[in-house]
Amino acid sequence: MSLRLRLFLVILPPLFLVSILLGLWRFAAAQETSEELFDRRLLAGALAISRDVAISGGDALSPSTRRLISDAGGGEVFYHITGPGGVYVTGYAYPPRPDMPVSRELPFYYFANYRGEEMRVMRLIENRSIDTLTGDSVVTVWQRVSDRRAFARGLALRAVGLIAGLVAALALIIWFGVQIGLRPLNDLEAAIRRRSPDDLGPIRRAVPHEVSGIVSTLNRLLGQVQDSFEEHQAFISDAAHQLRNPAAAILALAEALPHVQDRAERAHCEEQLADAARKSARLSEQLLSLERLRYDANMGMEPFDLDKVVEDVCRAFAAKALSCDLDFTFVSSKARLSVLGNSVLVGEALINLLENALKHGGAGMTTINVRTSSDTEGVMITVEDDGVGIPPDKLSTAFRRFSQLQHGEGTGLGLAIVGKVMVRHAGRVDLVPSKKGTTFCLWFPRDTPA
């Protein structure tokens, strides 16, 4: 459904409802007004007849009185006059009689039947002298109720017709007014539709104040998409560059291996080939980890025991550390450390820190220590070594993808993965100042959703 039609349907039904209520009120008001006007006409006719009877002694009515009681749009007026003692003076025979006593002080109105028709009757009692008689003179005038109602209905129908015409005119005004009001949105839609798929720049177009928030939100979204696209393109370019070297090394070793005849040299080539394959596999695994952290918003988050995860990672890493003649220790917290998150990702972050220390700690590194602890706000994993260390001013470079502070065997992805994991868990990774070596602290909120 178009916005124009939606606005039209929102505005028009209340307008129709108001017009219907107004028509009903106008119909009732027309009936009430007509009843009041016709009752006054009956009273005016009765007073005029009473005056003429007193003046002429009941012989004749004046022309003005006859015009007053003739049919003038509200129906014919009938009359009957009796003089003192109930003597018939003039008018129609057998007037409608009231069902209750008639007041002598005020005009008395009532409904009655006259020759099979419903009538509105007014009876007026006055003290009059006719000829030589003095006493109560009774003037009775009446009118068809159907004539009165037809007149009121005509008034109401004319009013309803006027209201219907106004509603129809308003409907047309609203229909075309909404179209004119939505023209800036239509122009905006046309401008966006004319854009090429590669044009993700902000929308710079004058729009009404009511939709400026939508345009601002859309511009922010376009900016985020543009940044994401550029970052994705940079990631693909970097990944292709990083994968090219191990792929080329594997291809060169694989092509040279069949031609190596010396057994010792052949074994050395096979070992180099296996090492190159392991590096390539590790690089691919880390690249997949980065992309999974970037795009997978549905990774399972559940409470887990941090000590258990760290202990499992340290147990698996211990053999590699001992083979490098390193003193490797793990000290767990005495209290249970509960974290809400993904235990696999946390383990991956810890593995990357440990391998980063192993590859870049330098020849003089002798120890790697891992410990878990907690404070009032969260829990921590601390990884400490006595290697060459990372200068604080180089920390931002160390966490950048494919960045290395010095040439080594790493891929440049380890710390980038650590940073992404901590962001996903609403935590942080800190480089703790130390006199020697490098100390990283991974801080997690305690039982707080990521």
Image (cartoon, rainbow, N blue to C red):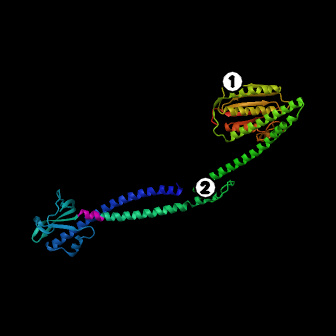
- Give the residue type at disc 1: Lys
56 or 310, which is in the foreground?
Answer: 310
**What residue is drawn where x is 52% and y is 54%?**
1
**Count of all numbered marks drawn on residues in the image:** 2
* Location of residue 254 in the rendering, given as x and y in whole percent from the top left corner: 83, 36
Give the labeled residue for mark 1: 334
Q: CA distance from mark 1 to mark 2?
A: 56 Å
- Can you name the residue that lies furthest to the right here? 262
* Location of residue 155 in the rendering, given as x and y in whole percent from the top left corner: 33, 65
Residue 212's disc number: 2
Residue 353's disc number: none
**What residue is drawn where x is 65% and y is 29%?**
304
Asked whether residue 246 is drawn in magenta, I would say: no
- Per the image, label 1 sits on a secondary structure element best described as loop
- Per the image, label 2 sits on a secondary structure element best described as helix
319 horizontally vs 105: left or right: right
Kindly tell me whether residue 413 is visible in this rendering. Answer: yes
200 horizontally vs 104: left or right: right
* Location of residue 284 in the rendering, given as x and y in whole percent from the top left corner: 75, 38
- Can you name the residue that lies furthest to the top here? 334
Compared to residue 332, the image places residue 283 above or below, namely below
Label 2: how many Cα within 10 Å (few below 14, some 14–19, many 20+): few
- Give the residue type at disc 2: Ser
Instruction: Read off the magenta span.
Output: 144-151
**What residue is drawn where x is 44% and y is 56%?**
13
Kindly tell me whether residue 405 is visible in this rendering. Answer: no
Compared to residue 129, the image places residue 326 above or below, namely above
The quarter of the picture where residue 22 lies is bottom left
